[in-house]
Image (tube, rainbow, N blue to C red):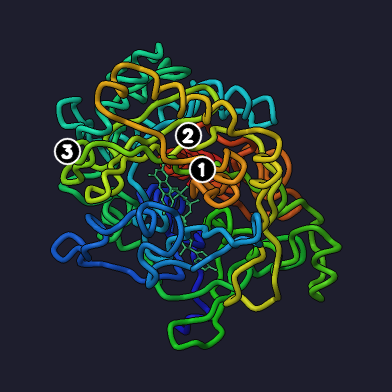
Amino acid sequence: MTREEERFDVVVIGAGSSGGALASRLSEDEGCRVLVLEAGQDFPDEASHPPPFFALGPVLGHHGSGHGSPVPDVDFMQFTEPVFGRPVRLGRGRLVGGSGMINGSVGVRGRPEDFARWEQAGAEGWGWDDVRPHYEAVDAIAPLHQWSRDEFLPGPERLVAGFEQLGFRWVDDMNAPDAWDGVVGPWPQNRRNGTRQGSLVTYVRAARARPNFELRPNVLVDRVLLDGERAVGAAYIDQQGRPATVRGDRVVVSAGAIGTPPILLRSGVGPSGQLRAHGIPCVADLPVGQGLLDHAYCRFLYRVPLPLARLLGPGMAAVVRHRDWYAIPAPFDEVEGLVSLAMILATTDGDGTVELRSADPAENPVVTTDFASRVEAGAYDTAWAHYNDVLETSALRDAGFSAVSGGQGLAEHLRAGIGSGQHMAGTCRIGAVVDPDLRVYGVENLHVADASVFPQHVSNNPDRTCMMVGEHAAARIRSLTHL
Ligand SMILES: Cc1cc2nc3c(=O)[nH]c(=O)nc-3n(C[C@H](O)[C@H](O)[C@H](O)COP(=O)(O)OP(=O)(O)OC[C@H]3O[C@@H](n4cnc5c(N)ncnc54)[C@H](O)[C@@H]3O)c2cc1C
């Protein structure tokens, strides 16, 4: 049989946090033939020979700054259009396991109220009571590591104590439904034996043994094949650089919040004006790529006596959570004596964009963010006040902390330092582009399942929510197809 004649029950595009979970769950039904097309490398012997970056390596680029790629060989090297005159890097894992294999491995759930907002936005069946069992299923396959307070490094421990003096409440479990709005505690880590528990080493590992599961790495999907208004497969560039096609009764696009819109747009699904500009006939006029959500990130530094800047040990063990932001206290430079507080806005709305640069699948899309307008509207004012207020506590004063950031004022600091929390989402939202079963409006047998479908953002790190989306999508697709 030639590859062109091959037919699968489901073709999943992208083996990332959501796609890996979804494809693996669907393949549990041995009557369902699942093919996964993945742009990046596979690491099939990861259990015996994990590459060092799975367990070690810088997480967010130089000094945790978000600039520069942590692992360029397995990253799309995506940048935004300039924000305050400079492009902002957006990490996009390009490997089996997706961004979940190169991320900071913080393993947290969304907030129950986030899902009440999802339901209000039209995501029927995605309320807290609906999603919680799917989070539990993720926990069962990718267990979390919990730090104890005596493992915190000295600088972060002082900051945690300072925030407690400001009235923040200690919690043992950041995934408890009430661990919000003024709490400090350990940050759950999605790691086992040091290795990030992305879908490569969890869901995909489990699926590989099944004869009805096939993974094709190093193939770049161009578009979904449509027969009129029905998805019938995918067109891709194969490992030798040749155009190829494959047939599927159902197609699920799981290429991530930045990767999914270009595939849909090249397929004729998206804003008609944009499609026309690229000579692509419009099949379904939908706001694909509009309303990009992300959490802005900025680092603030303190100067400390050298022993407090000690780096050896867990770097991101603690978190401080306010209603409007959350912050990571971490050592930054043990020679200069610097400790950082990376402050991330917990905004749940957003209006960035992902649009085609050209119809060439090898070209990254054009991405704009709303960080500049947010900053100018004062979104960091509360975080900035806390950066300064905690300095007045005896926990920091007595330990010799002093301010380093903001000498020229907050505005200048943000202009120079604003970056992405790497939490891109919302570019094919439930209620706008897909229905609550994640079916693309107006196109039969075509779904999206990844961070793109978030109708609003969650209030913190989204990886576990992306895996939950994969679990939930598998359950929904199974019920639609009686697989
Ligand atoms: C540097 C970094 C740090 C982060 N830290 C954290 C953290 O600590 N905690 C947390 O919760 N979240 C974190 N995140 C965010 C989290 O990892 C992502 O939100 C999540 O992995 C997104 O899942 P996804 O399934 O939507 O997309 P991805 O996991 O990115 O998967 C998309 C997949 O599709 C593939 N693909 C894309 N285009 C194509 C194409 N044309 N053809 C074929 N395949 C394609 C990609 O190669 C990739 O494998 C971080 C992200 C980054 C980049």
Is the shortest distance between ligand 1 and the CB of mark 2 under 8 Å?
yes
* Residue shown at the point (79%, 72%) measured from the top left: 280
Give the side of residue 144 with respect to residue 372, left or right. Answer: left
Looking at the image, which is closer to me, 385 or 401?
Answer: 401
Which is more N-terminal, label 2 or label 1?
2
* Residue shown at the point (47%, 58%) measured from the top left: 91
* Residue shown at the point (57%, 39%) measured from the top left: 409
* Residue shown at the point (82%, 70%) measured from the top left: 281
> Where does the image place residue 268, in percent across and percent down from the top left?
75, 66
Mark closer to the observer (1, 2):
2
Residue at numbered disc 2: 460
Instruction: Give the secondary structure at mark 1.
Output: helix
- Callout 3 amino acid: Pro
Please say if 386 is above or below 254: above
- Callout 1 amino acid: Ala
Residue at numbered disc 1: 473
Which is more N-terminal, label 3 or label 2?
3
Looking at the image, which is closer to me, 288 or 459?
Answer: 459
Report the disc number at residue 307. Answer: 3
Classed neighbour count for the residue bearing mark 3: other residues with Cα under 10 Å, few (<14), some (14–19), many (≥20): few
Mark closer to the observer (1, 3):
3
